[in-house]
Amino acid sequence: MDINRIKEIREDRDYKQEEIAKFLNVTQAQYSRYEMGINNIPIDKINKLADHYNTSIDYLLSRTDEKKPYPKSKI
């Protein structure tokens, strides 16, 4: 999984790993392993990051270059 944007967007927004790790309720070491691609990021954490950064999961996973999030589902 290409997760380079997870690190890029964090740095662009001037967040430290510790801050995002706390937001996701994981250790800084665990979050670092997500960024390095050592461990897969659980879907609930990716979803939380997309909401936090006001973007789409597809953008975070480099499936699109469009930063704008999709409209929320009504279901």
Image: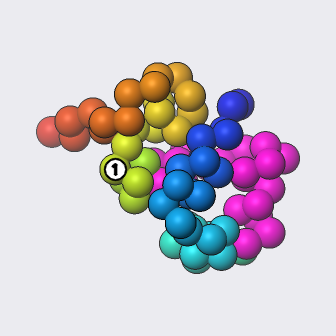
Q: Is residue 39 left or right of residue 47?
A: right
Q: Residue at x 53, y 55 (%)?
A: 12
Residue 25 in view in this figure: no
Closer to us: 3 or 16:
16
Q: In which quarter of the image is residue 70?
A: top left
Looking at the image, residue 50 sits to the left or right of residue 35; the answer is left
Q: Is the magenta stretch mostly helix, strand or loop?
A: helix
- Find disc 1 in the rendering and name its residue: 54
Q: Position of residue 15 (x, y in %)?
A: 55, 68
Quarter that holds the C terminus: top left
Q: Position of residue 11 (x, y in %)?
A: 59, 58
Q: Which of 42 and 54 is in front in this view?
A: 54
In the image, residue 16 sits, relative to residue 5, either above or below, namely below
- Secondary element under disc 1, as helix, strand or loop, is loop
Name the residue rendered at 48%, 60% in the picture: 13
Q: What residue type is labelled 1?
A: Asn
Quadrant location, the N terminus: top right
Which residue is at 73% across, 52% downward? 34
> Is any atom of residue 68 visible in this view?
yes
Is 11 on the left or on the right of 49, as rendered?
right
- What sort of colour scheme is used for the picture? rainbow
- Residue 71 placement: quadrant: top left
Q: Quadrant of residue 3?
A: top right
Region in magenta = 28-49
Count of numbered labels shown in the rendering:
1
Q: Which residue sits furthest left?
A: 74
Dot 1: few (<14), some (14–19), or many (≥20) neighbours within 10 Å?
Answer: few
Q: Say whether residue 66 is magenta.
A: no
Q: In the image, residue 74 lies at what x, y percent?
A: 15, 39
